[in-house]
Image: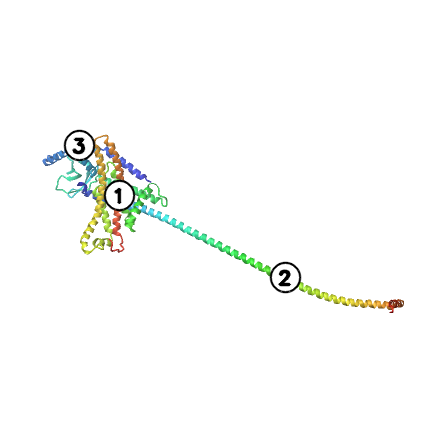
Amino acid sequence: MSLLTPNPGLIFWMLVVFLLVVFILSKFAWKPILKGLKDRENEIQGALDLAEKTRAEMAQLKSDNEKLIAEANAIRDQILRDAKDAADRTIAESKDKAAAEGLKIIESARETIRNEQAVAVSKIKKEVATLSLEIAEKVLHRELEDKGAQEKLIADLASSARLN
Amino acid sequence: MYTHLRRFFTIALIAATCVFNLPARADEPTQHEADKVAQAVNEEEHKIEHKLEEHEAKFNIGEMIMHHIADSHEWEFSHGVSLPLPVILYSEDRGLEVFLSSNFHNEHHEYNGYHLVHGESEQIVPVDEARKIYDFSITKNVASMLISAVILILVFTSVAGWYKNSKGKAPKGFASAMEVIILFIRDEVVKPNVGPKYEKYLPYLLTLFFFILINNIMGLLPGSANLTGNIAVTMTLAVLTFIIVHLNANGNYYKHLLSPPGVPAPLLLIMIPVEIVGVFMKPFSLMVRLFANITAGHIILLSLFGLIFIFQSFVIAPVISLFALFLNFIEIMVAFIQAFIFTLLSSMYIGTAIEEHSHDHGHH
């Protein structure tokens, strides 16, 4: 039965020693140990959070970049297309203009030629008339100067003219 | 970093060997004043003593076991090799008295008016029976408790030193070994059972766990004290848990105690006493569980070793030794399990007392 009877002296020492151990360990052991463990856990959690955040940022950045590239591509295509259209238009316009201009030039050339021709023709006509007159004058002059020749001519003319 | 720990053990070892070398000599009090009554009592006792010795020669296994489990005023390592421990007595007429227990090593086990009575357990009684004394001796259990306290403080302050000196480093060495256990107690035992306010109770519960564990393990060493198998020790621990629970319990806990919700009024007559008995059953079960488990383990081991002396056979000894070795491993496991269970149940009791109830009447 003595096993089941608590000894007051032992209870006293147990209380004193155990409470002292609790006090000393709480102050000098558990406090720094638990604080160290907590700090480390917070540190690890913080590092993990930061990594997660960075990864999200990287993904965001990447998608942003892709979007930018796509936009730039679209803009480039647009610009190229516009430039090509503009060039085509300019070429077509120039062609039309050149053709019209050519026609105009040809037309005016024709006109000029025609005018020149007319002028030339009229000039030639006048010249021919003058020449004819001069020739005729000269001929007449010569004919009338030479009596013998005229008589011969008349004779020739008379001989050739058959009297029917 | 652990050099001061090592130094402590070295000094302790040297001190122990020095004390062993002192033979447990007793100074014989030579005064034989012929007080006939006293002489008659002495003679009686002498006879009883003689009988006991005869008995011992015959080997009484029950006595042997009780002798090993019970507390003692000296630390006996082996037959005849013992370390005397200080006896501290307080009485109203004489005040505080301190002397070494080796003073009782005489024919009559008597010194300075006190008898050391070897019964089922050792007890110091005054020769003058009218006097009342209080025995605050450093017994074997107290000495063992002091050693365990010193070990605990040295170990955990050095672990704490590691945490202070190497902030932000990966755990290493002895600190990381302790860290595993500390984290287990914090995350698996205290946090889920005590609830969100666990940090307030963590130092007590951690100390409780390691105190019980180290004393359970120290109790398994040959020649050591059976501290956690002593009802005074387990009672103190259980009462401390009881006090912590009831100092921190909230109104809800007391309200549920006096009027369990959902119980019809006539049943309350039965329920309230049951609840109140339950309140005291909890620390009682804590006390008995640890005490019984550790004491039972010691009794089994001692019975096995006792068998060797009963059979006195060379054939049986190795078999029993092997079996005792196996049981020793189980006892190491029990040492951990009982420390764990005591801490677990303590945190559960604290947890239920401080729990904030969301008023869920109806199921209880």
Give the structural element (helix, strand or loop) at label 2: helix
Alpha carbon separation for disc pair 3 and 2: 145 Å
**Residue B141 visible at all:** no
Most extreme residue toward the left is: B36
Which of the two discs, 3 and 2, sits closer to the camera?
A: 2
- Which of the numbered marks, if any, corresponds to residue B249? none
- Mark 3–mark 1 contact, CB under 8 Å? no
Q: Indicate the quadrant containing the N terminus of chain B: top left, top right, bottom left or bottom right.
A: top left
Mark sitting on residue A99: 2
Nearer the observer, B345 or A93: A93
The image quarter containing residue B334 is: top left
Q: Which residue is mark 1?
A: B339
**What element does badge 1 sit on?**
helix
Pointer 3 local density, CA inside 10 Å: few below 14, some 14–19, many at least 20: few
Dot 1 amino acid type:
Ala
**Which of pointers 1 and 2 indicates the residue nearer the eye?**
2
- Label 3 – label 1 distance at C-alpha: 38 Å
Q: Position of residue B317 (x, y in %)?
A: 24, 32
Query: Is residue A106 visible in this depiction of the protein?
Result: yes
Q: Earlier in the sequence, mark 3 or mark 1?
A: 3
Kind of residue indicated by mark 3: Lys
Q: Position of residue A24 (x, y in %)?
A: 27, 45
| Residue visible at 54% across and 58% down in the picture | A82
Relative placement, left or right, of A1 versus A159 is left
Q: Secondary structure at mark 3?
A: helix
* Cβ–Cβ under 8 Å for marks 1 and 2: no
Which residue was labeled with disc 3? B58
- Residues at marks 1 and 2, common chain? no
